[in-house]
Amino acid sequence: MYIHVRVTAGAKKETIEKKSTDSYRVSVREKAERNLANGAVLKALALHLKMPLKKLRIVSGHHSPSKIISIEE
């Protein structure tokens, strides 16, 4: 399964907002440097979806605020 995520890096508050069944808006405190924001997004989604972190993987958008994330079933 794939989900679309729009990321705001360097935010004051960490939030996850579900836009539709396969679309989320995520804000993380980490800056978009050295892959810190990507790791924080995956951790936040894993906690929100109540699944292990290793089941989530960024497929597209490593250097972009718009990402596609694969969820292993």
Image: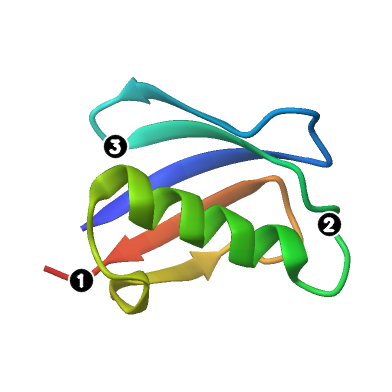
Q: Compare marks 1 and 3 and give the one earlier in the sequence.
A: 3
Name the disc covering residue 18, or none: none
Alpha carbon separation for disc pair 1 and 2:
25 Å
Q: Compare marks 3 and 2 and give the one earlier in the sequence.
A: 3
x, y percentage for residue 69? 42, 59
Q: Residue at x 88, y 65 (%)?
A: 33
Disc 3 is placed on an element classified as: loop
Q: Say which amino acid is labelled 2.
A: Ala
Image-based side of 20 in relation to 40, left or right: left
Image quadrant holding the C terminus, namely: bottom left
Q: Is residue 11 visible?
A: yes
- Tell me where residue 15 sits by quadrant: top right
Q: Report which residue position mark 3 lands on.
A: 22
x, y percentage for residue 27? 65, 35
Is the residue under label 2 in contact with that under label 3 (CB below 8 Å)?
no
Q: Report which residue position mark 1 lands on.
A: 72
Q: Say which amino acid is labelled 1.
A: Glu
Q: Report which residue position mark 2 lands on.
A: 32
The answer to whether residue 24 is above or below residue 9 is: above
Alpha carbon separation for disc pair 1 and 3:
14 Å
The answer to whether residue 62 is above or below residue 40 is: below
Q: Tell me the crowding category of disc 3: few under 14, some 14 to 19, or many 20 or more residues within 10 angstroms, Cα based.
A: few
